[in-house]
Amino acid sequence: MLNFADSKLEQIMQEEQEDILEQITNSDYKYGFVTDIEADEAPMGLTEDTVKFISAKKNEPSWMLEYRLKAFRHWQTMETPEWANLTFPTINYQDIIYYSAPKQKVAPNSLDEIDPELRKTFEKLGISLDEQKRISGIAVDAVIDSVSVATTFREELSKVGVIFCSMSDAIQEHPDLIKKHLGSVVPATDNYFTALNAAVFSDGSFCYIPKGVRCPMELSTYFRINAANTGQFERTLIVAEEGSYVSYLEGCTAPMRDENQLHAAVVEIVAMEKAEVKYSTVQNWYPGDKEGKGGIYNFVTKRGICAGNHSKISWTQVETGSSITWKYPSVILKGDYSIGEFYSVAVTNNFQQADTGTKMVHLGKNTRSRIVSKGISAGKSQNSYRGLVSVAKNASDARNFSQCDSLLLGDKCGAHTFPYIEVKNNTAMVEHEATTSKIGEDQIFYCNQRGIDTETAVALIINGFAKEVMNQLPMEFAVEAQKLLAISLEGSVG
Amino acid sequence: MLKIENLQARIEEKEILKGINLEIKPGEVHAIMGPNGSGKSTLASVLAGREDYEVTGGSIDFLGKDLLELSPEDRAKEGLFLAFQYPVEIPGVSTTNFIKTAVNEKRKYQGLDPLDAAQFLRTMKEKMKLVQIDQSLLSRSLNEGFSGGEKKRNEIFQMAMLEPKLAILDETDSGLDIDALRIVANGVNELRSSNNSFLVVTHYQRLLDYIVPDFVHVLYNGRIVRSGTKELALELEEKGYDFIKAEVEKETV
């Protein structure tokens, strides 16, 4: 009936989408404040002396310094990986401060002694460091810049044998566990950023669940970059002994700054026989402004090993922040009947770029893996899924299912899928499904006609799209993550 | 209820509505008929507020408000409902969740508290019977993979849930077999009252056998060229649109 106008109609629709798209990008990053805290910093730049400085600051034993120096020397021989679907200027590693610690007169003996400014920072982020507030029932390790400033519920957890403390404390107090496991899943030499991390990491969280213990509460670490020109290089290690269970949450925020800041973290998980580890991340580093200025470069290596039979590791991530995200939480399925899962929602808006996905490495027999990746792109952003499913020669009866869906808002953004499949055993079953869809003007109008305004309509559609992943998050986190999705895409209807 | 005066609208440079006059009173059912390209769906879209169409003249009064000043969502919340000719699919959003959002947005606008899950479910169960819609359909993603008949029934179901003052049915009969047509029409008839009105846009008279209109208007070339009662629809059925075209052209010469 309106054939004559089809092309015109398309044109009008396109113009309209552009209008709405402009509106969407008007949302502001609400965690962009800077806390005025006196900091103790290393001189800018990276040499062996920097590594020694960090190690000395932390009073580390000589084996730890050796580990760092070895990693540093190896790093110097390496080159920045360039295979990802990301474009960014060369990072000058001499322009970064590798150690910045909020100055505190003395180490706090209790949470009451924490610098009130720091306390305020975490309050602004909605994170309670107050152990009295039992309602939340979550133990928190708060890491600001290079150091852990507080870990809550330590004593309570230690009653059941769970160790939850900063990496610095762990090196001092549990050297045998650290020596045994640190670098056992992600060796320092694994890649450029793991070598860098191993050389200069300053803190992070350590979590140990003894045999047969079901961790009585969620454990979480909140990472905050505060100081200017500073990189954050934290290290997390989770060891779950036979038959244990833990659910671990991670959150990240940073101030708004014009320069790009580097975050290169390493997370290692070891799951022994029948152990289960659930690791959830809501990543909301500062993504840069609407013109793409500033924002965090997020180069992270996360890997878990299902070392024992019938063990399970599950990664869930909601990635809304960072100017650049380079991250592939992986599972090595070594134990027979072990299970690896990866659930991801990655949102990019404005000029953000994300190249994220997973690796499922099937080594044991009857191993299972499941990948659900949901990419949402808006503005002029680029969103890539990159995933590897490999089945080794002896990994008989391995199963994998991968689902990669992309949702586009507007026509200036990109969604890409790079699945790699390497199967060396013919009993394996590997399935891959992928879809791409777009929030259309007709969908928005349909919602409008039912009395649902555009913002609500987008949130409804986005949450519907990401539901399968959101359902994996612990309750409190899911609510937060849903809001975050809506905020990240506010105004960006297409 | 609704008063349209000299409404003119175009898409880009093409004039589609060239001066529509129409008044609908509470409790009335009006049918708009006309050949393809006469502007029927454009009229429905302009009333609902689709922005692809530019209103170049005239006015629309809806319950004392200037309809053209209202956003599409506010028109909906004021009680205007459009049953789409081509209902849109929204993957990942369950029909139930969608309708619940719509119902509660409207309640918020009216200053009412949102319905809790139990109240909502009760209302839903009641209205489901009207259009013989299956519960399992409502837990699926909105319109995704629905058959043509299911989509149209879902439109009427949403209408029942939202209880509009004025419902516009845009070619709701297209693509329906006789049984589905009867179900949809029964649903509409159940909802008819002295407080609400309907504007039924259709190409064929067969729908009007089931939804009996108080008035029938013939739209041709962007104008209402004939108005009458049910008999006009029957006459059209018998003689075809060509007879209207011929008559109108004779008049304008």
Image (spheres, coloured by chain):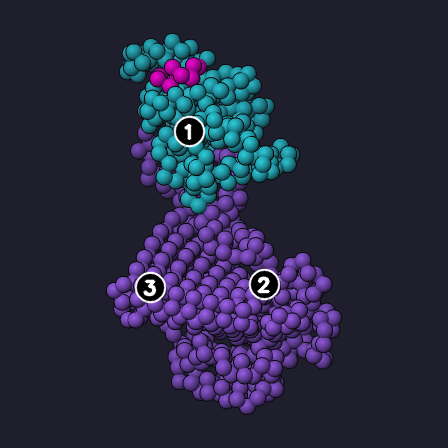
Q: Which chain is purple?
A: A
Q: Nearer the viewer, residue A170 or A455?
A: A170
Above or below — where is A97 with respect to A129? below
Please rate how many residues cluster around mark 2, counting C-alpha atoms within 10 Å: few if below 14, some from 14 to 19, many from 20: some
Q: Residue at x 49, y 71 (%)?
A: A242
Residue A4: horizontal and vertical position, in percent?
31, 33
Magenta residues (range)? B205-213
Q: Residue at x 60, y 61 (%)?
A: A31
User: Which residue in the protein does label 1 denote?
Assistant: B153
Subunit of label 2: A
Mark closer to the observer (1, 3)? 3
User: Which residue in the protein does label 3 denote?
Assistant: A398
Contact, mark 1 vs mark 2 (Cβ under 8 Å):
no
Subunit of label 1: B
Kindly indicate the quadrant of the structure image that contains residue A203. Answer: bottom right
Q: Is residue A85 left or right of residue A27?
A: left
| First-in-chain label (2 vs 3) | 2
